[in-house]
Amino acid sequence: MTYEVNPNGFYGEFGGAYIPEMLFPNIEELRQKYLDFMYDSAFQKEFQQLLKDYVGRPSPLYLAKRLSKHYNTNIYLKREDLNHTGAHKINNTIGQILMAQRLGKKRIIAETGAGQHGVATATVCALMGLECIVYMGAVDIERQAPNVSRMKMLGAKVVPANSGSKTLKDATNEAIRDWINHPNDTHYIIGSVVGPHPYPDMVARFQAVISEEMKWQLNEQTGRENPDIIIACVGGGSNAAGAFYHYLKDTDVRLVAVEAAGMGIHSGESAATSVLGTKGIIHGSRTLLMQTEDGQIIEPYSLSAGLDYPGIGPLHAHLIDTKRAEAVSITDAEALEAAFFLSKQEGIIPALESAHAFAALDKIKFSNQDVIVINLSGRGDKDLGTYIKYLDQYG
Ligand SMILES: *Cc1c(COP(=O)(O)O)cnc(C)c1O
């Protein structure tokens, strides 16, 4: 069994590049060059330097003693919440801005839902002095006002997508249209392990720094590189891909992918793609997605904006299909409870997305000897408005 992408961009039967003819030159240029650029020594030097001095890596691996005691096991937190801009997304945007520079692109476009990827993209564009245009659904612009202000302050232009449901998938369509119209000077920074090949593989490799650090940090603290279990939340799947990457072949390490079940898996208000999804094509790759029988995308729902996506990346579809990873679904209520619990147990307010990963501790089996790593993908400042509404209920 292999978990690596093949030269055509497939993980098993998932992946590929199903794109309009007009995008072929851009995608093909990226496909031919991304690995050579990425593993060029000057690129690696610059990437590693920025991860260290700008992002603040390595992110700590922290033994959560009170949480461990509560669950009678050994729980370590990989602290991606401590990165500059507050989440793992910056690892990928730093990598891709360096890629864009090598490709000679002067103009950067991105799509964003909750605005987290938009902020991470606007940040690296400011860092490099490149023009930045972020497409965002008009409804999301209303809902995520603080992130819109952040992007503007960082010098990005935020363009509303007014078609369809005016949310993430409509913003993605606008970004693709823009790229078709500006094939020569523009690079499209995709924010997760989704989209046509080579994006899922490229983003996974940039995020792989998470598990690369986990190996030596665990070795330092426990005397072995491999934990028994790694738990990560999955929207598109980039923080999970990064946390799993260097352990994919080590089948003694259990990989747990946690999805948002919203109001309940079968409530009609959910984003539990690996349970509800069927095989189909979304945003240029063949994967699992939530769709009607005639192939219309079903609007996903989660209280957490970062997990509110109707598909999962092709690597995750393959990991779940082959049973290499276990899928766990967590409702809004379970995630909120976990967020309040972690805050009081450890003094760490997690992003609502990351809280889903913590809630999985109540759903899976483990022993008191096990070493468990939870990828704490982001911090909760952005979710304070949501948390405040539930203070009386869970606080
Ligand atoms: C965006 C986001 C996610 C979901 O995206 P993935 O690509 O699945 O990692 C999870 N956690 C945080 C904090 C996010 O900002």
Image (tube, helix red, strand yellow):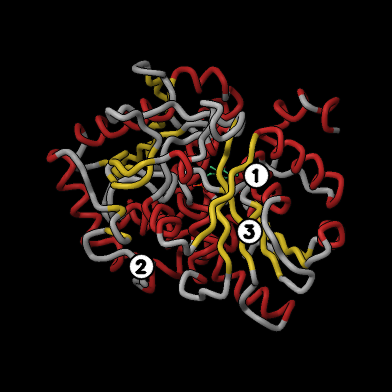
Q: Residue at x 52, y 50 (%)?
A: 90
Q: Position of residue 136 (x, y in %)?
A: 43, 26
Residue 27: numbered disc:
none
Q: Is residue 7 above or below residue 114?
A: below
* Mark earlier in primary sequence (2, 1): 2
Is ligand 1 less than 8 Å from the beta carbon at label 3?
no
Is ligand 1 less than 8 Å from the beta carbon at label 1?
no
**Quick check: marks 3 and 2 in contact, CB under 8 Å?**
no
* Structural crowding at the residue carrying mark 2, measured as other residues with C-alpha within 10 Å and reported as few (<14), some (14–19) or many (≥20): some
**Residue 183 placement: quadrant:** top left
Q: Is residue 291 above or below residue 24?
A: above
Residue under label 3 = 56
Q: Could one spot residue 155 in this view of the protein?
A: yes
Disc 3 is placed on an element classified as loop
Compared across the picture, whether 19 is left or right of 229 comes to left
Q: Position of residue 71 (x, y in %)?
A: 81, 58
Residue 4: numbered disc:
2
Residue under label 1 = 356
Compared across the picture, whether 273 is left or right of 131 comes to right
Count of numbered tags: 3
Spatial CA span between label 2 and label 1: 27 Å
Q: Position of residue 323 (x, y in %)?
A: 46, 61
* Mark earlier in primary sequence (3, 2): 2
Q: Residue at x 45, y 65 (%)?
A: 46
Q: Could one spot residue 129 in this view of the protein?
A: no
In the rendered image, the quadrant that contains the C terminus is top right
* Mark earlier in primary sequence (3, 1): 3
Disc 2 is placed on an element classified as loop
What kind of residue is marked 1? Answer: His
**Residue 130 placement: quadrant:** top left
Compared across the picture, whether 168 is left or right of 91 comes to left
